[in-house]
Image (cartoon, grey):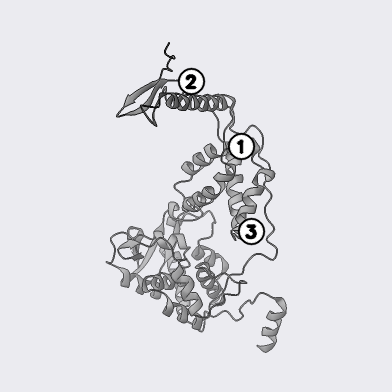
Amino acid sequence: MAKPQLAGLREKNGIWHIEKRVKDYKKGWLRESTGIPISKRREAERYLLNRLAEIQIEILRQNKGVYTFTQAAFRYLKEISHKASASTIALHLDQIIPFIGELTLENVHDSTLSNFIKHERGRGQSPKSINNALGVISAILHRSAERWRNDQGKPWLQYAPPKITRLSLIGEQKLAYTLSWDEQDRLLKELPSHTADATLFDLNTSLRESEIVRLRWEWEFQVNGYSVFILPGTATKNSEERIVVCNSIAQSILEKRRGIHATHVFTYKGNPVTGLNTKAWSKAWKRAELPTNGRFLKGIHNIRHTCGRRLRAAGVKLETRKVILGHKNGDITTHYSQVEIQELKDALELLTNRKKASPALKLVGKVSETKKQLKVA
């Protein structure tokens, strides 16, 4: 007597496919290929049973308001996809999900995160980088408890999320490095031309790396004969519009780049640059004989830091520096008057005067060494 066959399978091009109505399943029908050849019916039936079990568990979880971290992570990514930080957050989640993705939200806490932290330390990630990833986890847990609801109105996470312990940064944080004018010249000489252009532009505008690579010609307009960019909130770190005023040096870079690409200011081989912290940057930094002893940062953030220090050395007031640096302050960029924009232009023009925009003292990392510098001076 032939064994009874499980309903819900049909043959298509020599492969078993599932076609079965599933009660309470959002899609109504489960339709997918098993990838199993027609000669292996029993194996295809086992596959179907496993899929039905998975779906029932998922339905039960949703009815009870039980969700996995992976489900929450993908919802979070969808909600923040418009932000400039979305790609960085996606990279963090790519590292996190293999360790806690299948856990329910209630089971994400310090104990279950220990293996992830151990793995990240083992591959050389800094405590600050790991803390950034832990911050993403905390943000997802908070949204699950405070914002997200299932069809029955229950929160994805029933209770307030546990506080995720961050790693200590004492003795771990690297210092930003302020370039001297000679060091700047050496670095620019060693960089590829397209990166040198972006770096010199950054030294005179103080953009973040993500803002540099996104900079588009359509955001440019003219005020009294010089260029001003209005960056939309989707292109900035804090999701607020940002004004970028060009001094004479930044303007010269724009004129050099104009006409090379239809949409983006900074490109390489016909495509928008995707980042400045590349191997070419690291090699140029080393050839320029800039610090590589582990105490200082070696990346593009030093350029933004250098710009800020030079503005301060030139006597630019704090409020104006905050606007130039793009710090979050609640102001709406497009409400700046021409007089205020001219004030920003005048402040940035001070960066072209090497004598006036020179920080008097470079932080070297230890108070004792700084005192020695003061005595010598």
Going by the numbered disc 1, the residue's amino acid type is Leu
Label number found at residue 105: 1
Residue linked to disc 2: 24
State how far apart marks 2 and 1 are (Cα).
23 Å
Q: Secondary structure at mark 1?
A: helix
- Is 346 situated above or below 84? below
State how far apart marks 2 and 3 are (Cα).
45 Å
x, y (%) of residue 67? 57, 33
Circle 3 packing at 10 Å, graded few (<14), some (14-19), many (20+), is some
Q: Residue furthest right?
A: 368
Circle 1 packing at 10 Å, graded few (<14), some (14-19), many (20+), is many
Residue linked to disc 3: 127
Q: Residue furthest front?
A: 1
x, y (%) of residue 73? 53, 41
Q: Is residue 311 left or right of residue 228?
A: right
Q: Closer to the N terminus: mark 2 or mark 1?
A: 2
Q: Quadrant of the C terminus?
A: bottom right
Q: Camera-side residue: 339 or 290?
A: 290
Q: Residue furthest top?
A: 1
Residue at (68%, 41%) from the top-left corner? 162
x, y (%) of residue 172? 66, 64
Going by the numbered disc 3, the residue's amino acid type is Pro
State how far apart marks 1 and 3 are (Cα).
24 Å
User: Can residue 66 be seen in this snapshot?
Assistant: yes
- Is 205 situated above or below 53? below
Q: Secondary structure at mark 2?
A: loop
Residue at (54%, 50%) from the top-left corner? 95
